[in-house]
Image (tube, grey):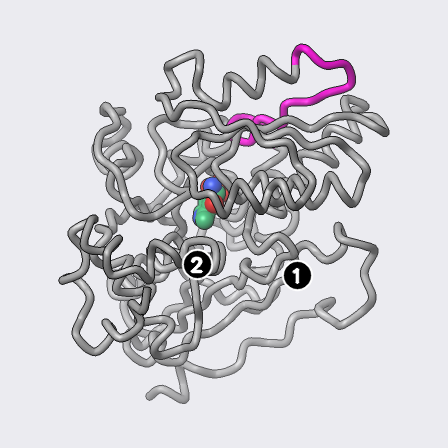
């Protein structure tokens, strides 16, 4: 049975080892990794898009390049200009890389709840980092609003506005979506991913829906503390955001411009508790050698649940957003797991990986 489900997809045209132009050229064209074990377990073909292979280490490199190139094309960002963003991590890292390559000043506002490693990395990449109090979006002191206000005070500066600037989703519509379609030879029944800004889900989802004449189902994967799962499953009621998750970079309290009306085209949503996400972080390492962050693990849990929902023989893709390197002092620390009440959630045979 496995051999039938695990057949090779057609080799994608255009995916050669040609030389590319600089850092921008090295963003995207990531491998699509088939999981033999999860494919066998579900009787489906389960694929993860290896976004951790981007130069900045995450899926957000694509959005960073997309918003900067869009601003350049519109004449909003000129040589020697300044790029300002509010970000908790990966977008800032992507922007910092692209700004170095293109000669822009990069200024990042981030909540002071973020790890020192991320602040250090951004500064090493040449960004100016302003940690600000971690307050809700409604508060004018929120890091996003501070980024916008700062950009307004400087000539030739842009606030890239990753949540509501649709050049973000557009980058995924033009790159991630087409790559997944090509890499699966157009044989794709379902795509599922979590959402932070909504750029990946809506950009990829819109492309796949169009190419498949609506036949590829698009599903949302949502962590605790996000309102989107209940929004989708209650037919559009937005509740108050409460609680949190060990996953970083995903979950949302509102319908961003990037998610926009695409939210109405979703086939459904999965709520994935942290216990399942952390177990999958360890499981993917143990059985596939993949060292991935918690949002990638949550996506893989959802891909398995979607496979179970759609039934054997189907083809399902998700996003492997970034590696665990950025979070290892948390995800692989016994003490930290205990503080989150998750130490006992990890099966005995996987606990040996919690070495910190
Ligand atoms: N995973 C991680 C680790 C992220 O940093 C992000 C972006 N915040 C996402 C997933 C979600 O991507 P998007 O913003 O495109 O919804």
Residue 60 lies, with reference to residue 185, above or below; the image says above
> The magenta stretch spans which residues?
152-166
Judging by the rendered image, the residue that carries numbered circle 1 is: 29
Q: Residue at x 58, y 47 (%)?
A: 121
Q: Position of residue 271 (x, y in %)?
A: 24, 47
Q: Residue at x 29, y 67 (%)?
A: 354
Tell me the number on the disc at residue 318. 2
309 left or right, relative to 120: left
**Place of residue 35 in the rendered image (x, y in percent of width and height, measured from the top left):** 42, 75
Q: Is residue 161 magenta?
A: yes
Asked whether disc 2 touches disc 1, contact meaning CB atoms under 8 Å apart, the reply is: no
Q: Between residues 157 and 314, which one lies in front from this camera angle? A: 157
Q: Secondary structure at mark 2?
A: strand
Seen in the picture, residue 24 relative to 86 is either above or below; the reply is: below
Q: Residue furthest right?
A: 79
Q: For mark 1, give the secondary structure.
A: loop
Mark 2 surroundings within 10 Å by alpha-carbon count, few (fewer than 14), some (14 through 19), many (20 or more): many
Q: Quadrant of the C terminus?
A: bottom left
How many numbered discs, if any?
Answer: 2
- Residue 326 rendering spot, x and y as whole percentages: 47, 54
**Can you say which quadrant of the picture contains the N terminus?**
bottom left
In the foreground, 331 or 6: 331
Q: Would residue 285 be counted in the magenta stretch?
A: no
Compared with residue 275, is residue 14 higher up or lower down, i.e. above or below?
below
Measured Cα–Cα span from mark 2 to mark 1? 15 Å
């Amino acid at each position: 049975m496995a051999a039938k489900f695990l057949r090779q997809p057609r080799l994608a045209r255009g995916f050669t080892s040609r030389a590319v132009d600089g850092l921008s050229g090295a963003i995207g064209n990531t491998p699509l990794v088939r999981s033999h074990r999860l494919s066998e377990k579900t009787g489906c073909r389960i694929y993860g898009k290896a976004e951790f292979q981007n130069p900045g280490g995450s899926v957000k490199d694509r959005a960073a390049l997309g918003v900067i190139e869009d601003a350049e094309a519109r004449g909003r960002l000129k040589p020697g200009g300044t790029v300002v963003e509010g970000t908790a991590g990966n977008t800032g890292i992507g922007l910092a890389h692209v700004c170095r390559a293109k000669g822009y000043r990069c200024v990042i506002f981030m909540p002071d709840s973020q790890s020192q490693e991320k602040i250090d990395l951004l500064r090493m990449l040449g960004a100016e980092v302003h940690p600000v109090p971690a307050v809700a979006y409604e508060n004018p002191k929120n890091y996003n609003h501070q980024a916008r206000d700062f950009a307004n005070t400087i000539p030739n500066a842009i606030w890239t506005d990753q949540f509501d600037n649709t050049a973000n989703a557009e980058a995924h519509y033009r790159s991630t979506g087409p790559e997944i379609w090509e890499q699966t030879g157009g044989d794709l029944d379902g795509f599922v991913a979590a959402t932070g800004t909504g750029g990946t889900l809506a950009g990829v989802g819109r492309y796949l829906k169009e190419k498949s004449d609506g036949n590829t189902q698009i599903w949302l994967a949502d962590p605790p503390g996000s309102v989107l799962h209940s929004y989708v499953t209650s037919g559009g009621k937005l509740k108050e955001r409460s609680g949190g998750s060990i996953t970083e970079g995903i979950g949302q309290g509102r319908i961003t411009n990037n998610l926009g009306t695409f939210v109405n085209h979703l086939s459904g949503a999965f709520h994935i508790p942290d216990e399942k996400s952390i177990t999958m972080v360890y499981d993917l390492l143990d059985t596939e050698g993949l060292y991935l962050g918690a949002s990638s693990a949550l996506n893989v849990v959802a891909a398995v649940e979607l496979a179970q929902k759609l039934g054997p023989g189907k083809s399902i893709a998700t996003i492997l957003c970034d590696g665990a390197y950025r979070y290892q002092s948390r995800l692989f620390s016994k003490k930290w797991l205990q503080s989150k009440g998750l130490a006992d959630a990890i099966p005995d045979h996987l606990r040996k990986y919690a070495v910190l």
